[in-house]
Image: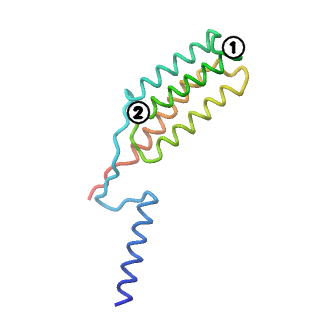
Amino acid sequence: MDATWNEKLKATQREARRQSQGHLTKGQVVSGRPVSFFSYMPALCVAILKDLLDLVFIGSLPGLGTIITLCFSILIFFLLMLSGSGQRYSLAKKSLILLIGTLTEGVLIGINMLPIETMTVLFIYFIDKKASKSRVELEA
């Protein structure tokens, strides 16, 4: 009797480990919404506006540019919180990528003329879309 109970326990632990690592068995579905480009449009519009301000040298001023970059990045972060697939670790990934993009633009002098914020939001969209496509229903 102990051997049967131990086997069932080990099988349950293996199944829990497999599911926590992202492996699905037949018939299981991972919850989440499909990613829509329109849900990223507000963040993308704000990023384009910020990059346009950088292009006309308003965002390139030393003190004012830093404040503008931080304010727009915080706004983009809040807009990205509302968009996407609702995946469990999605918000952490988005915020890390946005932080890297913002710091890259803020620290590297002269690179703020490139549309870094727009490219960052588009990169986050494509990452989220790829993750959404990988979460498909397995056929029985």
> Is the N terminus in the top left, top right, bottom left or bottom right quadrant?
bottom left
Which badge, 1 or 2, is on the more N-terminal residue? Answer: 1
The alpha-carbon separation of the residues under discs 1 and 2 comes to 31 Å
Label 2 sits on what residue type?
A: Ser
Residue 53: x and y in percent read: 58, 13
Give the farthest residue toward the top: 56
Label 1 sits on what residue type?
A: Leu
Give the farthest residue toward the right: 109
User: At 65% across and 17% down in the image, what residue appears?
Assistant: 65
Q: Which mark is residue 107?
A: none
Q: Which residue is mark 2?
A: 83
Quarter holding residue 5: bottom left
Q: Which residue is mark 1?
A: 61
Residue 55: x and y in percent read: 61, 12
Q: What secondary structure is marked by label 1? A: loop
User: At 26% across and 59% down in the image, what residue appears?
Assistant: 140
Quarter holding residue 85: top left
Name the side, left or right, on which 49 lies relative to 36: right
User: At 61% across and 31% down in the image, what residue appears?
Assistant: 101
